[in-house]
Each structure stands twice: as C-alpha cells, then as structure tokens.
Amino acid sequence: MQIWIGPEAGCTGPSASLSNVHVLWAPVQSPEEPHRALPKMEELKLIALDAEDLRILSCHLQDAVIRVGDMAYLKEGMRFAAIANRFDWEGAVKSKDDEFQRRRTGLRFERVKSAQVQGIDLKKKDKVLVLLAVAFEPGDEPEGTLTLHFAEGGAIRLGVECIEAELRDLGAIWSTQHKPEHASDDSSTTS
C-alpha cells in the first residue's frame, strides 16, 4: 500500500512526554498463543515534502527504536538514513488486550547539508535509542533544520536544503506485549 500524506491526516499516538519506555528489540512470539494471528499492521510508505507532512511522518515514528549502528549520514550523497523498529500506535489504540506490534522501517532524509549529534555516543553502535519526534525549524525558505528528538535528551540535527523525507516499511511484523508508556500531560495538583 502506498500512502501520500497531506494536511488532512492526523496523529494516532500519544504526544505526552516520555517517562518510562519498555523496548523490545527482537521479534517475539507469545508462548501462550504461538499461532495466534494478529490483525495485519498497515504497511506504510510515507513521503514528507513540507512541515505538515513531516508532522504525520513523526507521528508514525513515535517510539520507534533505532540502534546507533543503524543510522548513517552520507555526506557525499546528501542523505541521512536509518533503520528502525516502529511501534504500531494505530493498532495499539484499537487493541483490547496487551498484544501490540512492531515492524522494520526504513527512514531517509534527502538534501542534507550537515548533521550534528547531541547526547548520543556514536561509538556505542549497539545502543538502542527511542525516537520521540521529528521536528522542522524553518530557515531561509525552503532551507531549515530537521531535528530527531530521542529519549534521554539525545538529538540529531540535520541542516537541509528543503524537506524531503521518506518512511518505508521493510519487512515482517512481530508482536510484543510491551507498549511504550508516557507520563500524563496533566500537571494540575489537588489539595
């Protein structure tokens, strides 16, 4: 299935801040129900060409897990690419039990002029990062800065000529009983 995204699409995952994330890196099968068929997670191919498109792409990538070794900035090709395990928030919202899904996903940003890393040790190739959001700060139109925000304060800032990004699902779906947990946005107190 191919999806071209636009302003009418919306987020299905939570947008609260992250407090505690349970990460499951490898595919698993429930020992209690080894042959239970889950509803198939929608295969996505999303293209982002403006800030609104990027917001939709970011929603689908919320809580994706990415190994440091599965990210690369290709300076000569002006590309930043990563392989992630994205969490199916759309399915999680509809789920009536504790059975959730993840899927391997490719992510690429084109026309990247520079890349800066903050709070991420690039030597720790097996370190797993949790992607919270992808944001865009405009500069001199159409240029700007794309920022990949990770849990624990890490970030990758990409100087881009313009927004040109793609998310493409790559492979099999697997089930997990771990759903990323977010703190409540409710900061009010009662006496």
Image (spheres, rainbow, N blue to C red):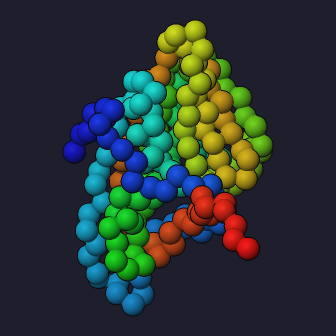
Viewer-proximal residue among 44 and 6: 6
Question: Total number of numbered labels?
Answer: 0
Q: Residue furthest left?
A: 1
State the image quarter where residue 54 is shown.
Answer: top left
- Above or below, 158 relative to 39: above
- Image quadrant where one finds the C terminus: bottom right
Question: Which residue sits at x=61%, y=61%?
Answer: 186
Where residue 146 sits in the image (x, y, percent)? Answer: 58, 28
Q: Residue furthest bottom?
A: 32
- Image quadrant where one finds the N terminus: top left
- Above or below, 8 relative to 131: above
Q: Residue furthest front?
A: 191
Q: Is residue 81 left or right of residue 157?
A: left
Viewer-proximal residue among 33 and 179: 179
Question: Which residue sits at x=26%, y=39%?
Answer: 3
Viewer-proximal residue among 180 and 43: 180
Q: Is residue 66 visible?
A: no
Where residue 145 sits in the image (x, y, percent)? Answer: 60, 23
Where residue 7 sits in the image (x, y, percent)? Answer: 33, 32
Q: Is residue 32 visible?
A: yes
Where residue 107 sits in the image (x, y, percent)? Answer: 46, 39
Question: Which residue sits at x=42%, y=40%?
Answer: 57
Viewer-proximal residue among 126 and 110: 110
Question: Which residue sits at x=66%, y=62%?
Answer: 188
- Above or below, 184 relative to 155: below
- Above or below, 141 relative to 80: above
